[in-house]
Image (spheres, helix red, strand yellow):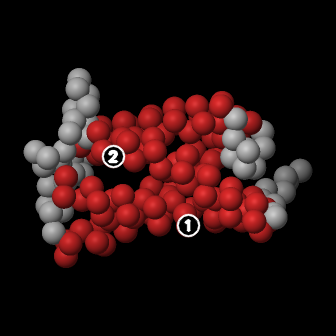
Amino acid sequence: MRQNLRLPGRVIQHAIAIFTISVALNYVWEIAQAPLYAGMENWGSSWWHCFVASLGDGILVLIIYAIGWAAFRRSDWYLHPSGSAYSLMLAIGLCIGLGVEWVAVYVLNRWAYTTGMPLIAGLGVGLVPVLQMLLLPPLIFRIAASRLRIKKL
């Protein structure tokens, strides 16, 4: 028997809100940190790359949302976050930040840092992009929760 895999409209609205807020906030962060990456020191070469990166960041935040949904068994787990919800956001954000940077720099050679990028000792990955995945997801979820509570979804 085939299961119905349709997502409820409410979940789709949550995901859209999280994704759009995430892309907007991550784009600002990506532009601000662009000079810390080799070849991204000027606006002309970085605005499009930063936009594409912010789309990827939006997907990464949706992954945090999905993990939270699975862990707490509620699609609206972030609307009134507990300490464990914030712990989940930080733990998954840390794993994503470290993992993406390490793989991109040392495995795929997708980007390199300028001498201005502060590095995490022992790991050799940029501190600023790791902080991005630690600091922005809680803010994104908070803004999305406020927006959705106003709409009374």
Callout 1: few (<14), some (14-19), or many (20+) C-alpha neighbours within 10 Å? some
Q: Quadrant of residue 85?
A: top right
Name the mark on residue 100: none
x and y, in percent, of residue 41 in the image? 15, 63
Type of residue at label 2? Pro
Name the mark on residue 129: 2
Residue at 30% across, 45% down? 128
Residue at 63% across, 40% down? 67
State the residue in front, 125 or 147: 147
* Numbered disc 2: secondary structure: helix
Question: For the view shown, which residue lies furthest in the bottom direction?
Answer: 44
Residue at image mark 1: 20
Type of residue at label 1? Thr
Q: Which circle's residue, 2 or 1, is located before the other in the chain?
A: 1
State the residue in front, 107 or 17: 17
* Numbered disc 1: secondary structure: helix
Relative to 67, 75 lies left or right: right
The C terminus sits in image quarter: bottom right
Is residue 107 visible in the rendered image? The answer is no
Callout 2: few (<14), some (14-19), or many (20+) C-alpha neighbours within 10 Å? many
Q: Is residue 12 above or below residue 62?
A: below
Residue at 65% across, 31% down? 83
x and y, in percent, of residue 4 in the image? 84, 57
x and y, in percent, of residue 126 in the image? 26, 40
Question: For the view shown, which residue lies furthest in the top direction?
Answer: 122
Q: Quadrant of residue 102?
A: top left
Relative to 33, 63 lies left or right: right
How far apart are the alpha carbons under marks 2 and 1?
19 Å
Residue at 14% across, 47% down? 116
Is residue 151 visible in the rendered image? The answer is yes
Q: Is residue 84 above or below residue 135?
A: above
